[in-house]
Image (cartoon, helix red, strand yellow):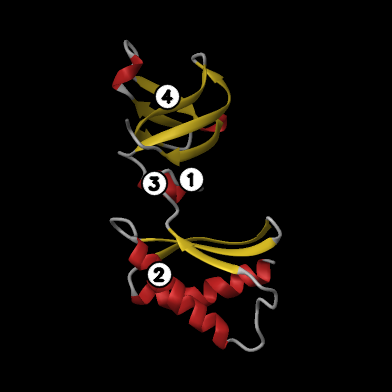
Amino acid sequence: MSNVVETVKQVVKPILDKHSFYLFDVEFVKEKGGWYLRVYIDKTGGVTIDDCVLVSDELSEKLDELDPDPIPQAYFLEVSSPGAERPLRNEAELKQAVGEYINVSLYKNLNGSKSFEGTLKTLNDDKLVMENDKWGKHPVVEIPRDLVAKARLAIKF
């Protein structure tokens, strides 16, 4: 299935470049008895439903033109945003999130918790520094990088 993903990435790139979007991810998965091709796109300021429809229409047309068909089975095409609480999957995405409100899950407890939500103030090779005024006397926490299981953007309530 990685062939499908790689082919779709190549086909969608010029479409996204033309509209100043960027590719967040592509997945091709079987769920509930059907195949789903999911293309996650983004742009500065976020994407709209109209943006997703535009990319879906253009991508569908381009995929239909390919011969041989890279996806011979029936599938559903879904184009969407990665979401407001998108995962921060790598160093570059973490760096972009400095100053943003995030959620960090840990492999083991730190200060009695395995999860922290707050503003990412800084990061380096050794630690993340987060701040949240709801944490009382200790509004800043330093999280060793080797304890971080996953991180994502979060919505502040």
Left or right: where does residue 81 sit relative to residue 20? right
Q: Amino acid at mark 1?
A: Pro
* Mark 1 vs mark 4: in front: 1
Query: Which residue lies most toward the top here?
Result: 137
Residue 89, position as x, y percentages in the image: 51, 47
Q: Earlier in the sequence, mark 3 or mark 2?
A: 2
- Give the CA separation, mark 4 to mark 3: 24 Å
* Mark 4 vs mark 3: in front: 3
Q: Secondary structure at mark 1?
A: loop
Q: Secondary structure at mark 3?
A: loop
* Mark 1 vs mark 2: in front: 2
Q: Are marks 4 and 3 in contact (CB under 8 Å)?
A: no
Residue 38, labelled with which disc?
A: none
Judging by the rendered image, the residue that carries numbered circle 1 is: 87
Q: Residue at x 42, y 72 (%)?
A: 55
For the C terminus, give its image quadrant: top left
Residue 84, labelled with which disc?
A: 3
Left or right: where does residue 56 sit relative to residue 138? right
Res. 15 visible in picture: yes
Q: Is residue 47 above or below residue 13?
A: above
Q: Nearer the viewer, residue 27 or 75?
A: 75
Residue 106, position as x, y percentages in the image: 55, 28
Residue 53, labelled with which disc?
A: 2
Q: Is residue 82 above or below residue 100?
A: below
Q: Residue at x 45, y 31 (%)?
A: 127
Q: Residue at x 63, y 69 (%)?
A: 75
* Mark 3 vs mark 2: in front: 2
